[in-house]
Amino acid sequence: MPQGQPSVVPDDGLTTRQRRNRPLVLVHTGTGKGKSTAAFGLALRAWTQGWPIGVFQFVKSAKWRVGEENALKVLGASGEGGTVAWHKMGEGWSWIQRAGDDGASAQQTNEWKAREGWEQVKRDLAAETYRLYVLDEFAYPLHWGWIDTDEVVAVLRDRPGTQHVVITGRNAPQALLDCADLVTDMTKVKHPMDAGQKGQKGIEW
Amino acid sequence: MPQGQPSVVPDDGLTTRQRRNRPLVLVHTGTGKGKSTAAFGLALRAWTQGWPIGVFQFVKSAKWRVGEENALKVLGASGEGGTVAWHKMGEGWSWIQRAGDDGASAQQTNEWKAREGWEQVKRDLAAETYRLYVLDEFAYPLHWGWIDTDEVVAVLRDRPGTQHVVITGRNAPQALLDCADLVTDMTKVKHPMDAGQKGQKGIEW
């Protein structure tokens, strides 16, 4: 257990315990590797605490995160820790009956799917469905303007109960960073791709 | 699956597949959060591939990483993916019969334990015991000079077979970064501790 001492003690009327257990918004951004892997690593801690975990994968390809998905589903089904609900945009969110993309361009469909995902996150936050939300690659639809960052910030700020939210992706908007409690920039120092080596199973997915 | 194209194609006589599957040394360093969580997130991918995983926790306190340890042990015992062997310096490495710290200072004992851990890693690398090694917080004993970085670099460079090694911790020595295939600096942008909030269960451990 970390023994660090905070450098300031806020005059917020909270006890150390109350302050310690405040729900957090965490953002992993930057161009380096580790943004999503750290978010799923965090899910291991939440799982051990018995927390219900909701994963929302805001990426087109369903091939990504297959390792994390398999592992977290096995954990969720083990009955030994928290539950895990896994939602994938790439295969159509589980709560949507049909993709509804007749006549729409691929980008329009992706925009629409991303917004539908966010609508479900809002419903779950209001209902306090999960205690940890992993919004994987959620920074992209914010950066592209598909989802309104100001609305996301307002919903996160006003969410009820004790719900932690971790958001990953490059180019997280400044307003999201401003509202977050913890921000880590995964800074690329060196990557095998720079030396001509492509991604490999077990490492990249 | 990532579709990125490398910016250079080396003249190394390897096919794309051979180059793709070269074993990697990964380093997660920097002052931000996510170094170890990303390493354990990586272990989820390795587990899904069915790879044997060896974790070596180079930290004094056995209270750290309890979430990751519980989760990975459940996964390892599930029979559905790879195996997981978890070794902790804080409780005395499992292969050491007695701590041998009679008359030694706490620091001498820690130095000795860290070196013993590295000796075991060397034995396992030579025997190709695991396919993924998580050397958690291993950058510290290197930074402090408890373990010789040049020796570590030589052992990593000459390791047989297909063994991936991920090393975490602040202040990773430059010689280690030079030998690594992938380096991410987890850069702290904002941390709850700065706002007077201490670490909490499910998030920090």
Image: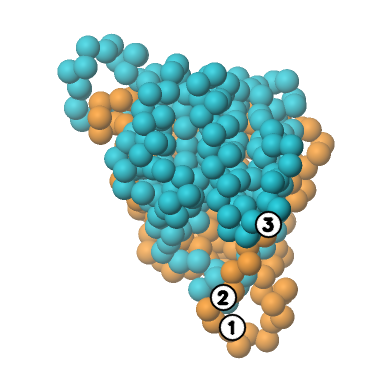
Chain colours: A cyan, B orange
Alpha-carbon span between mark 3 and mark 1: 40 Å
Q: Chain of mark 2?
A: B
Q: Quadrant of the C terminus of chain A?
A: bottom right
Q: Are marks 1 and 2 on the same chain?
A: yes
The quarter of the rendered structure image containing the N terminus of chain A is top left
- For mark 2, does the 10 Å Cα neighbourhood hold few (<14), some (14 to 19), or many (20 or more) residues? some
Label placed on residue A54: none
Name the residue rendered at 71%, 53% in the picture: A102
Q: Residues within 10 Å of mark 3 (few under 14, many from 20)?
A: few
Q: Say which residue label 2 marks.
A: B6
The label number, if any, that marks residue A103 in the structure image = 3
> Could you say whether the residue bearing mark 1 is in a helix, strand or loop?
loop
In the displayed structure, would residue A46 be above or below residue B114? above
Q: Is residue B159 left or right of residue A3?
A: right
- Where's residue A86, x and y in %? 66, 35
Give the image location of residue A12, x and y in percent: 21, 17
| Secondary structure category for the residue under label 2 | loop
